[in-house]
Amino acid sequence: MDIDIFTLFPAWFDWFFAQRHVRRALTLGHRIEAIDLRATTPLRAGQVDDTPYGGGAGMVIRVDVVAAALEARYATDALAVREQRRVIALAPSGRQFDDALAEELAREPGLTLLCGRYEGFDERVHSHLASDVVSIGPYVLSGGELPAMVVVDAVLRKLPGVLGDPASAIEESFSRALGGAPEYPHYTRPAAWRGVRVPDVLLSGDHGRIREWRRAQSRERARIRAEEGGD
Ligand code: ADE
């Protein structure tokens, strides 16, 4: 997979790219890069944003700046990039990111992520340059950089060989293997800690019963989440 992240703060990704699973993805032949949106701006003095039409607080990232960055990268008309690869603008107003979308994105050969800042992007970035607008949750962060890391992290975990143990990615929270439910609880040694014991079934060695218990726990967590208004 080929991942490009357009951002005004490429240095934010230095730490992320140095993490073990990201480096493993690179050694497997995947490619990931943070690209400075300011480097290709057609405006003077590195300008990338402007005041909003209609007034209001904050600055808005200009569509011509994003278009220029895409054209410099892909040597094609900016409007055509989303026909070649998924172009994901990160914004709190977008579609909520979830495990199903991570699965879907993991099947793409190429991803482009656009990180907003300030008041975000001019709406024409969403409507004419992006294929998707994605939010990682109903809260506002200071930019799209952390959301981009969340999306890339969740997607990389789905790629074969990126995790040390491939089984880890299959039966995890919200996966299809668990019917979209949260994952069951995990325990390790010691079997008793301050009088709190690990459930007997996990020590029983009976894999059928263990599987049944885990599925039941997972369903119970889904029920509690729904009751709490999580769904
Ligand atoms: N940019 C700022 N907040 C965001 C969020 N919650 N999701 C995606 N992008 C964002």
Image (spheres, helix red, strand yellow):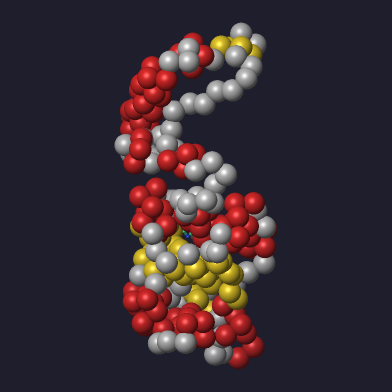
- Look at 38% across and 41% down and name the residue there: 175
Query: Could you say which quadrant of the image residue 23 lies in?
Result: bottom right
Between 44 and 161, the residue placed more toward the observer is 161
* Rendered position, 17 above or below 98: below
Between 68 and 43, the residue placed more toward the observer is 68
Q: Is residue 99 visible?
A: yes
- Look at 67% across and 63% down and name the residue there: 14
The location of residue 139, given as percent across then percent down, is 47, 52
Query: Could you say which quadrant of the image residue 195 lies in?
Result: top right
The location of residue 76, given as percent across then percent down, is 42, 87
* Rendered position, 199 above or below 108: above
Q: Is residue 150 left or right of residue 44?
A: left
* Rendered position, 190 above or below 139: above
Q: Is residue 120 visible?
A: no
Q: Is residue 221 left or right of residue 34?
A: left
The location of residue 213, given as percent across then percent down, is 39, 20
Q: Is residue 122 left or right of residue 198?
A: left
Can you name the residue that lies furthest to the top here? 195
User: Quarter of the image containing the C terminus?
Assistant: top left
